[in-house]
Image (cartoon, grey):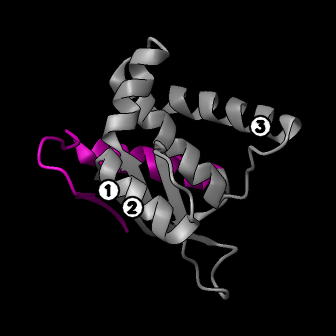
């Protein structure tokens, strides 16, 4: 089940069902099923507190994802909590001269790709992850 939670009052996703459908298609295309995925949309301060408390990092970020799978089901089902700073997404969209909605979809996809095992720490794997993001962004339209 895919859920959307809002820790800020001035934001909500219109047509959540379309987003949910797109996420399901991405997972199906990768050979996985939907477990319990929670998207938590929040502010910079909210995500900064998460970053400090759980990752011991003292800076803002656009997305933090915590995979939460059952060992027996992990190969088939994707689950976890994805925190997205709407403040960062808005700033990034301005910085990259991108529509807010496109940048939001990008970070939503980016977190899913991490759950699927994709990595962006090395150049080669980062290039693959960017290609996957671009591919799924087209699908997400």
Give the residue at x 88% y 36%. Answer: 124
How many numbered markers are drawn? Answer: 3
Q: Which residue is mark 3?
A: 126
**In the rendering, at what x and y percent does residue 90 appear?**
34, 28
Q: CA gap, disc 3 to disc 2?
A: 27 Å
Q: Which residue is mark 2?
A: 49
Can residue 49 be seen here? The reply is yes
Give the residue at x 49% y 44%. Answer: 61
Q: Is residue 141 left or right of residue 132?
A: left
Which is closer to the viewer, label 3 or label 2?
2
Q: Is residue 31 left or right of residue 17?
A: right
**10 Å crowding of disc 1: few (<14), some (14-19), many (20+):** some
Q: Which residue is mark 1?
A: 46
If you read the primary sequence from the N terminus, does the residue marked by circle 1 or circle 3 appear first?
A: 1
Which is closer to the viewer, label 1 or label 3?
1
If you read the primary sequence from the N terminus, does the residue marked by circle 3 or circle 2 appear first?
A: 2
Which residue sits furthest left?
A: 9
Please name whichever residue, 31 or 60, is drawn nearer the observer in this view of the structure.
60
Q: Secondary structure at mark 3?
A: helix
């Amino acid at each position: 089940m895919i859920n959307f939670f809002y820790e800020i009052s001035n934001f909500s996703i219109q047509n959540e069902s379309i987003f949910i459908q797109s996420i399901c298609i991405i997972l199906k295309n990768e050979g996985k099923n939907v477990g319990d995925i929670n998207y938590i949309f929040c502010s910079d301060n909210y995500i900064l507190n998460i970053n400090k408390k759980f990752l011991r990092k003292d800076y803002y970020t656009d997305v933090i994802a915590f995979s939460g799978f059952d060992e027996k089901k992990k190969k088939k089902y994707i689950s976890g909590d994805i925190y997205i700073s709407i403040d960062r997404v808005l700033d990034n969209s301005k910085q990259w001269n991108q529509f807010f909605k496109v940048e939001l979809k990008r970070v939503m996809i980016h977190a899913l790709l991490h759950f699927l095992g994709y990595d962006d720490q090395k150049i080669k794997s980062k290039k693959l992850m960017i290609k996957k993001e671009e591919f799924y962004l087209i699908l997400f339209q």
